[in-house]
Image (tube, rainbow, N blue to C red):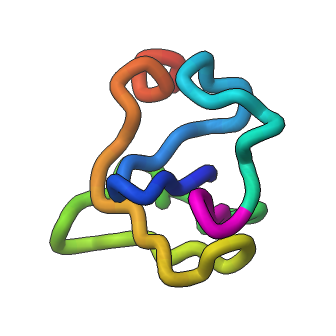
Amino acid sequence: MIIHASGKAHLPGCGHIDPADIRAPLYGWVLAPSPGAWRRLAPSHPLRATQGNTERAAVSRCMTCDATQ
């Protein structure tokens, strides 16, 4: 999962993100999120980046990416 500064999570291949831009400090990411992490994303259950900008935490899902799940 790719985490933007806005707190929105995106999945690899999302059309909203230019792959060349996915780097710290703008983005953080989690290469192997736990099963169900995508569905659990919420302000009450944030997902903190483990790589890139590890200060980033996702609290919502990209609706375009969500439609693919």
Q: Residue at x 38, y 48 (%)?
A: 8
On the question of residue 40 being in view, the answer is: no
Q: Residue at x 39, y 33 (%)?
A: 62
Front-most of 23 and 7? 23
The quadrant where residue 30 appears: bottom right
The image position of residue 52, as x and y in percent, is 72, 71
Residue 49 position (above or below residue 27): below
The image position of residue 58, as x and y in percent, is 39, 61
Q: Residue at x 58, y 59 (%)?
A: 26
Q: Residue at x 36, y 41 (%)?
A: 61
The image position of residue 16, as x and y in percent, is 54, 23
Task: Please tell me whether residue 36 belongs to the stretch shown in magenta.
Answer: no
Furthest-left residue in view?
44
Give the left or right position of residue 53, taking residue 65 as reference: right
Residue 69 position (above or below residue 31): above
Magenta: predominant secondary structure element? loop
Residue 15 position (above or below residue 49): above
User: Which residues lie in the magenta part?
Assistant: 24-29
The image position of residue 60, as x and y in percent, is 29, 49
Residue 36 position (above or below residue 63): below
Give the left or right position of residue 4, taking residue 14 as reference: left
On the question of residue 47 being in view, the answer is: yes
